[in-house]
């Protein structure tokens, strides 16, 4: 699915706003929104960011915190011009709810109609309401004639288990169009209008037959639960090993943010964690300073009350079968046309999000549509990286990338595994490196010797963190990136985003792809507009004929590398591979 262009009141956004100290009215995705125009002749469509002009007027209202407030107010013509967010940013999570309502109203065809009520002040509704139903939800293919290089447009109208028309959005749909015989496929972009209606757009990359499958990955109710309950819980658990001489003790730890505690061993790294800390139970006979190892963290259901566990069970009841919408696959035929291929920009920072991220031409070669790219051979790859110093930090999804770069292109590369992390053996404290410290260790001398390229992936080992803790860490990683860019203005920074890991099926909590999708939104929002490039592979992985897993197959990794290389050396991309 890639990016569900929707508003579902992301509660994490206000935490980011408080950290930035800048509140942008009307942001609905957590990474900006554009006006979307759809016609049958669309061949290229971009999601543009919000216009933030005029923010300086708001910020400058309190540009000098040492000036007495009475003097500042006296300088203004009208005190009523001050907005709530001018006084403080805490507790503004409700702004996401308002933004969602405004978005929904904008797309509600009946917004100006007044229905006559059947009872004084009320109308009689149906007796039951449920989650979105696979059997009752309706699909409508809008194209009468589908042409090569045009957009295929399917409309979803969601209905619940009791055949009631859904009046709000937030369901998480995934969609793929494919031709198994040709081994060609592409993901669909989902536009959530907020009123129970969704558009799904595909790029018609080939001629001939195609099948469209649309899946309800998770309902709004499940997403709400994940967002408002699980992602606010302290569920990341670690084990601590203390050693003093020959005496060893083990205790339990948690990663927490903004909660009270007492009589714990507290471990801080403000430059990397911000206000988030690692709290461990104190060992009985060893000092907190004697910590030697932190074991891998695992989620524990003990953080959930029995009522919460029961609610979660009810939400998932009956949702783990094949979640394809009734009426799929939709079989279509794509006819030839004289439409030209989309004109793509060079790969670089802050590119808009295309309607289609690209397509597989033979289940081996992926053609990106976000920017101009190519398949890199050994010779051109070595030339590109010959004067580059590559520093890689993140989870194991980058291990295949750095291995490919090192072995095939002789890259001068260093890979640092993130910590603390899920799985694996205990990590010695002296070997634990956090991303902010890792970036701060890149010196001006390093940048003078070669052009520095940084690749970050801060996703999979953090999906058990609460949103506030994750935002704290990602925000401080962004600050470290900005410090690097001051020291090394020519540095290239690539942020690799998450891909789906469990196919198009409903997954248990904490493995649900909506969590990873939301983490992508958070990361894009925090790193926006500072000159980093986003490596988006969600649609690449989702549309492949193999089942998505965390550690991708070699030929998918190779296509990731081809895209990454096109960002590192965009001037060496001779011709875009699109439709070649």
Image (cartoon, grey):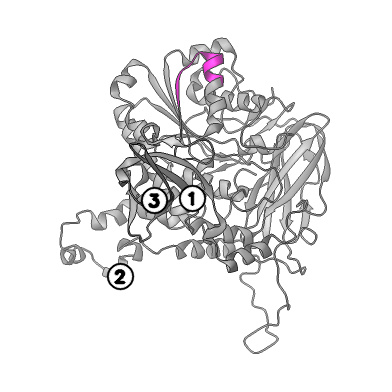
Instruction: Check whether the beta carbons of the residues at disc 1 and disc 2 lie within 8 A of each other.
Output: no
How far is disc 1 from disc 3 in space, using C-alphas? 12 Å
* Side of 577 relative to 386 (left or right): right
Q: Which residues are magenta?
A: 404-415
Q: Quadrant of residue 148?
A: top right
Q: Earlier in the sequence, mark 1 or mark 3?
A: 1
- Kindly report which numbered mark, 1 or 3, lies closer to the viewer in this rendering: 3
Q: Residue at x 65, y 37 (%)?
A: 549
Return the residue found at the far top: 379
Locate the N terminus by quadrant.
Answer: top right
Let me know if residue 410 is in the magenta part.
yes
Q: Position of residue 3 (x, y in %)?
A: 59, 45
Query: Residue 80, which numbered label?
Result: 2
Is 73 placed above or below 335 here? below
Mark 1 burial class by Cα count in 10 Å: few <14, some 14-19, many 20+ = many
Residue linked to disc 3 = 280
Mark 3 burial class by Cα count in 10 Å: few <14, some 14-19, many 20+ = many
Return the residue found at the far bottom: 120
Residue linked to disc 1 = 236
How far is disc 3 from disc 2 in space, using C-alphas? 48 Å
Return the residue found at the far front: 246
Residue 169 seen by the camera: no
Is 234 placed above or below 463 here? below
Between residues 14 and 197, which one lies in front from this camera angle? 14
Locate the C terminus by quadrant.
Answer: top right
């Amino acid at each position: 699915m890639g990016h569900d262009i929707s508003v579902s009141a992301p509660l994490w956004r206000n935490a980011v706003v408080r950290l930035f100290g800048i509140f942008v009215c009307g942001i609905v995705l957590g990474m900006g929104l554009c006006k979307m125009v759809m016609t049958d002749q669309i061949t290229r469509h971009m999601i543009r960011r919000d216009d933030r002009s005029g923010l300086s007027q708001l910020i400058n209202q309190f540009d000098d915190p040492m000036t007495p407030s009475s003097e500042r107010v006296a300088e203004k013509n009208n005190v009523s011009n001050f907005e709530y967010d001018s006084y403080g940013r805490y507790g503004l999570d409700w702004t996401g709810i308002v933004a969602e309502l405004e978005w929904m109203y904008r797309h509600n065809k009946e917004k100006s109609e007044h229905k006559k009520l059947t009872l004084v002040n009320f109308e009689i509704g149906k007796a039951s309401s449920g989650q979105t139903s696979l059997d009752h939800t309706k699909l409508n293919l809008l194209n009468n004639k589908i042409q090569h290089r045009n957009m295929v447009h399917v409309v979803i109208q969601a209905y619940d288990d009791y055949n009631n028309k859904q009046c709000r959005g937030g369901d998480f749909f995934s969609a793929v169009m494919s031709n198994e015989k040709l081994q060609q496929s592409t993901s669909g972009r989902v536009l959530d209008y907020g009123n129970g209606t969704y558009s799904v757009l595909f790029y018609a990359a080939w001629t001939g037959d195609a099948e469209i499958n649309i899946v309800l990955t998770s309902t709004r109710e499940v997403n709400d639960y994940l967002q408002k309950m699980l992602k606010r819980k302290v569920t990341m658990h670690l084990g601590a090993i203390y050693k003093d001489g020959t005496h060893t003790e083990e205790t339990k730890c948690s990663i927490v943010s903004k909660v009270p505690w007492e009589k714990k061993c507290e471990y801080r790294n403000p430059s990397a964690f911000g206000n988030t800390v690692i709290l461990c139970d104190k060992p009985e006979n060893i000092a907190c300073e004697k910590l030697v190892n932190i074991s891998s963290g695992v989620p524990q259901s003990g953080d959930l009350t029995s009522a919460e566990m029961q609610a979660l069970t009810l939400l998932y009841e009956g949702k783990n079968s094949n979640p394809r919408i009734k009426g799929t696959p939709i079989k279509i035929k794509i006819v030839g046309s004289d439409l030209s291929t989309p004109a793509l920009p060079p790969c670089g920072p802050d590119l808009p999000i295309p309607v289609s991220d690209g397509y597989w031409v033979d289940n081996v070669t992926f053609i990106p549509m976000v920017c101009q790219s190519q398949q890199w051979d050994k010779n051109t790859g070595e030339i590109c990286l010959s004067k580059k110093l590559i520093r890689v930090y993140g989870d194991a999804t980058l291990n295949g990338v750095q291995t490919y770069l090192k072995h095939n292109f002789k890259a001068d590369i260093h890979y640092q595994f993130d910590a603390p992390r899920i799985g694996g053996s205990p990590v010695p404290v002296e070997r634990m490196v956090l991303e902010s410290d890792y970036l701060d260790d890149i010196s001006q001398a390093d940048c003078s010797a070669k052009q520095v390229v940084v690749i970050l992936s801060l996703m999979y080992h953090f999906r058990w963190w609460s949103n506030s803790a994750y935002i704290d860490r990602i925000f401080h990683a962004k600050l470290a990136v900005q410090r690097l860019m001051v020291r090394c203005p020519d540095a290239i920074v690539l942020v690799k985003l998450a891909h789906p890991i469990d196919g198009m099926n409903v997954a248990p909590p904490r493995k649900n792809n909506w969590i990873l999708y939301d983490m992508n939104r958070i990361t894009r929002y925090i790193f926006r507009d500072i000159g980093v490039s986003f490596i988006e592979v969600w649609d690449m992985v989702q549309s492949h004929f193999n089942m998505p897993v965390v550690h991708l197959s070699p030929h998918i990794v190779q296509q990731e590398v081809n895209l990454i290389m096109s960002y590192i050396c965009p001037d060496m991309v001779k011709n875009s591979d699109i439709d070649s």
